[in-house]
Image (tube, rainbow, N blue to C red):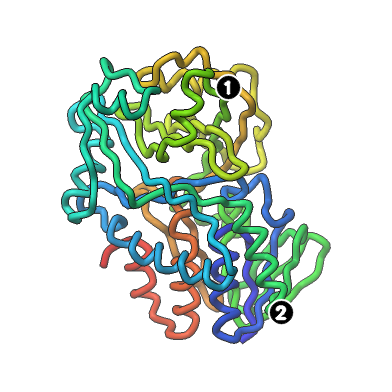
Amino acid sequence: MKISVVGAGIAGLSTAWSLAKQGHQVMLFEQGPIPNPLAASGDHHRIIRRAYGAGSGYGAAITEAYDAWDELWADLGESHLDARGFMAVSRETGDEAEDYLNGLREGGWPCEVLEPGEAAERYPFLDPDTIRYAFFSPEGGALHCRRIAFSMAGWLQARGVLLRQTMKVTGVDPARAAVTTEDGRTIEADYVIVTAGAWVTKLFPDLVSDLTTYRTAVVYLDPPAHLKEAWARAPVILDVGGETDGYILPPSGEGGLKFGSGLHKIASADANANRDPVAGEGEAIRDLFAPPMRDIDRYAITGVVTCAYTFTADERFFVREEGNCLVVSACSGHGYKFGAAVGRRVAGFVENRDFAALKSWMRAEA
């Protein structure tokens, strides 16, 4: 089949990878370069981890995600995963960190619970007087997004996939399996797969009832000298407890120490709007992390990076079939870790056309 894929974030790249392995003729469109620094997949590093809340289904799905990444590493001839494990900190009874711990225990997956003093001794950046406990699991780490995109683009080109970088798609005709580009060209195929991230509602405006776009930001920091070594060996931090909804990636690959919080987001109808950081934004994000981080005012801000994500009301993946077109959207910022597995599943759907099975898997219902 001749298949057009719109959007070359991790879902689009992985879909093209899997389709090419099945022998399809693939054309991959991306409005910017690959990787696109404005896209959710365009930053240096992202978290992969086992922990999800009890009963969510996504904790079990990580097994398939790891298998898909391993297949990709084998094809690329190199791994872009820093498997340093992950941790979380609980500060209040029933907070999200505790929910993650319950999810690990429900699945029988490995985790080590640390009392406050023990946690601060191992991770000196923590203030033990502000936490209930911390826990560590070896099943997590940092995925190096830009390295992955560069490597995948090279692999795809070598296998005959047509990469159409800086070619913005402005319209999709599901009935004709056709895309219209910004320069006025119409390109037909047998099928179209749209993995356009935060720009998907520009192509399908009716999806605003299902997908809400948010503008978010993360801050890169230089820690104080007495904590640099601790951060260099730290795991990724999935949650810092309480209501902060904060996550941290330690220095890994080309990526420096990065703090981000789910509290720091605003709804935005345009994924391109307000992408420049504003004065004081880095400090505002950083300061959300005290507690449980000690000496937070001694962390120097080295940069602020904005991003746009689509969110679903139930924080699950979204998929819709319309005519000769499939729309796939990650949700709530946790889609990257499943990227390789999403690509394999979407390519499998092209072969078997079992939409119910695809949707069930995307929503972690089975």
Picture layout, residue 20 above or below residue 126: below
Relative vertical location of residue 179 with respect to residue 103 in this rendering, above or below: below
Amino acid tagged 2: Gly
Q: Amino acid at mark 1?
A: Glu
- Dot 2: element: loop
Vertical relation: 70 (above or below) 19: above
Q: Which residue is mark 1?
A: 281
Identify the residue shown where x is 71% and y is 62%.
Answer: 169
**Split into 4 quadrants, where in the image is the C terminus?**
bottom left
The location of residue 298, given as percent across then percent down, is 52, 13
x and y percentages locating residue 152 in the rendered image = 63, 65
Quadrant of residue 364 within the rendered picture: bottom left
Spatial CA span between label 2 and label 1: 43 Å
In the rendered structure, find residue 160 and report the number of the disc placed on it: 2
Q: As displayed, is residue 165 above or below residue 185?
A: above
Judging depth in this view, the residue of 176 and 234 nearest the camera is: 234
Image coords of residue 353 (percent x, y):
43, 82
Q: Is residue 56 left or right of residue 74?
A: left
Question: Which residue is at 62% across, 34% downward?
Answer: 305
